Structure formats: C-alpha cells, structure tokens
Amino acid sequence: MNESKLVCEAVLEAKQAELIAGLKNREGLAAELEADYLDQIQSAAERIFVVQNLDWNSKQLREVRAALTRIAEGSYGQCLRCDEPISPKRLAAIPWATLCLNCQEAVDRERGFGDEREPARG
C-alpha cells in the first residue's frame, strides 16, 4: 500500500472514531415538558437539529466504513462510476470519496446541484 493510502486510512480511522463518539452523544433528544409554549417550540427545534445531525453523522460513518473496506479490498481510489483513478488531491480532501471529480460533477448536475452557467468554450 502506498504512503498516500496509508495516510488516508489513518485519517479515515480517526474520522470513524470521531463519528462513533458523536453518535453516542444523544443529549438533546430527551423530551421535557415545558410550561411555556415558546419553550416547547424551542425544545422541538433543538431536537430536530440533533436528529438531523445524528442522521448526517450516520451517513458519513457509512461512507467512511465503505472507504476502509475498499482499502482492505484493494479498490480504494478507483472511481465507482468510470473506474478511473480518483486524484490524490481529492482523496486528501475527501478520503471517503467514491467518485472522481468529473463523475462527481456529472452526478451533481444530474441532481440539479451544478453550476447553471454555460461551460467555457475555447
């Protein structure tokens, strides 16, 4: 395994530990009866935020674990869409990336997340 993959693996393992610790923290989910209606609304909004954060962390943990599996299987760093190598810069920035930059941009455009400007011609 090359040095960059070892670094990515260490980063992924650290991120996995961080996410697991964060998922264990469920403070803010407990429902308390508030006398004041505005306090009830505030508490409900805080619970929604905590649940959304837990959902996000769970999704990211699945992505990190999948990347660690790809490292173990020897397929880490290959785009799952076009099978071309994912650039080391992209993997350094997002070690759990599954797509090369070109494929990610295509997926983002398909989902409506892309830049709406005309591509440069030249």
Image: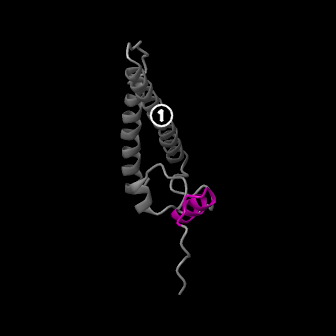
Left or right of 26 on screen, residue 82? right
User: In the orientation shown, which residue stands out farthest toward the front?
Assistant: 37
Q: Amino acid at mark 1?
A: Gln
Q: Main secondary structure of the magenta part?
A: helix
Left or right of 107 on screen, residue 48? left
Residue at image coords 60%, 55%: 80
How far across and how far down the image is residue 78, in percent?
A: 55, 57
Q: Secondary structure at mark 1?
A: helix
Left or right of 84 on screen, residue 44? left
Other-residue count near label 1 (Cα within 10 Å), few / some / many at <14 / 14–19 / ≥20? few
Question: Any magenta on residue 53?
Answer: no
How far across and how far down the image is residue 122, in percent?
A: 53, 87
In which image quadrant can residue 22 be found? top left
Instruction: Tell which of 18 and 84 is nearer to you.
Output: 18
How far across and how far down the image is residue 98, in percent?
A: 54, 53
Residue at image coords 61%, 56%: 111
Q: Which residues are magenta?
A: 101-115
3 to 120, vertically: above or below: above
Q: How has the structure been colored for display?
A: one colour
Residue at numbered disc 1: 52
93 to 102, vertically: above or below: above
39 to 107, vertically: above or below: above
How far across and how far down the image is residue 117, in percent?
A: 53, 72
Instruction: Tell which of 81 and 46 is nearer to you.
Output: 46
Residue at image coords 53%, 62%: 85
